[in-house]
Image (spheres, grey):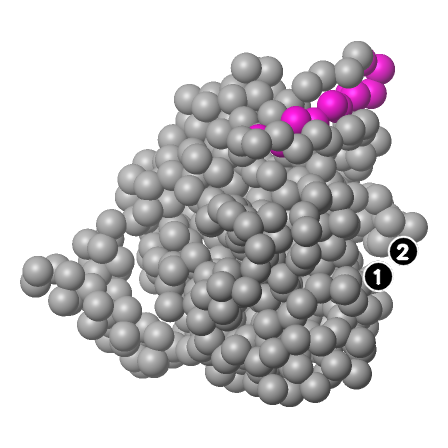
Amino acid sequence: METEQRYQAILSYLFSQFPQYQRIGAGAYKSGLEGILALDKLLEQPHKRFKTIHVAGTNGKGSVSHMLAAVLQQSGYKVGLYTSPHLIDFRERIRINGAMIPQKGVLKFVERHKAYLDEYRPSFFEITTAMAFDYFAGQKVDMAVIETGLGGRLDATNVIEPVLSIITNIGMDHCEYLGNTLASIAAEKAGIIKARTPVVIGERDPQTDSVFLQKAEDLAAPIFFAQDGFKVQESIQEDDCQRFIVIEEGGEPQEYCSDLRGWYQQKNLPAVLMAAKLLKINSKAIREGIRNAAQTTRLRGRWESISQKPEVIVDAAHNAHGMKCAVAQLHKRDYRRLHFILGVVVEKDLDSILALLPQDALYYFTQAQIPRALDAHILADCCRKAGLHGQVVERVQEAIAVAKTRAHPQDLVFVGGSIFVAAEALGSG
């Protein structure tokens, strides 16, 4: 009990003294690498004691990171995985072979360095990044998959020297920090490309391909466009998995199954397959890792079904790029009526998201319990102007309960619009 109490006190300290960007937005954003470089020096550069793979992108970087970690684990590696934000438990951010960092690991790091943290005030993300590197080094992982937080060039994770970089895709998100064009956002993400280090680009786009090609040429980095090497010919939804028919360049169709059931995974899969090929992972480990990615790494909130009759699906799609894929999958589903629980954060381009949403759904306008959440009443007003109609239910769990009460057993309830709405739907409160 003493450890639990000390751990909760440490979490309160971190959350109150070092605000998270994910919770409050711009007030917690810290540009530049000075903070993480100072922490890295204090810790004697722990990231140099294990191999790393660096993953950036507007959407899909979390799924790609988890799938690749599962593939590496199946291949026999001891694998660290650093991602953000967490959904339910802070310790989700830092895992080894699917297991979260223990409470004692968090306690040990913060208590040892509290004087430094109080004096130099690094950001929350810099602290968690340093904690992850320190933990992975101490546990002697073979390889760590490191997901960027925001952007790439100035992201705190960009002190690593990876054996492989991956950029999943580029979309219009976080424009206030990364730029207002796809090319400018791509330039920030391209900041993770390192000299003479292979880089995989998950999705081709005429507006961004030249940015990546030029950066790779400048740094003599071998560049691989995943969709040129692996084409997903078909994806088939089944009760417990999703099947993909994939054609590798110059080869015959191959089948892969995954417990990640989101339709958008067909965009992520080529990046994972190209990365695994470059890392020389054997085909059995690739198949098993992809098949059990969510189970192996404990990934949640990606087209996750949490109850039946009516089925309730929770998805972390939180921008137009991600919502477009989620809505496309909804259109493919067979249901009597769609109940859509929607909540967003304030800085999103709401008009671009609302233009994608089905007008015949019954909406429940809600908000996550974080400062960044857009007020549910303001959201409702914006939605009504866009032709979307429903009711305000301010808390996510209550919105789900109301929707389930109103829904027919053959209806479908979808929860999305924000990672934090997804988190509260999954039980974080």
Answer yes or no: is residue 294 visible. yes
Magenta region, residue range: 241-251
- C-alpha separation, residue under disc 1 versus residue under disc 2: 6 Å
Circle number at residue 207: 2
Residue in the foreground of this view, choosing between 385 and 35: 385
> Hey, which residue is sitting farthest right in the picture?
206
Q: Quadrant of the C terminus?
A: bottom left
Coordinates of residue 254 in the picture (x, y in percent): 72, 16
Q: Residue at x 58, y 55 (%)?
A: 408
Above or below 256: residue 39? below
Mark 2 lies on a secondary structure that is loop
Q: Residue at x 38, y 52 (%)?
A: 92
Q: What's the amino acid at mark 1? A: Ala
User: Does the CB distance between marks 1 and 2 fall below 8 Å?
Assistant: yes
- Which residue bears the numbered disc 1? 183
Q: Is residue 228 left or right of residue 188?
A: right
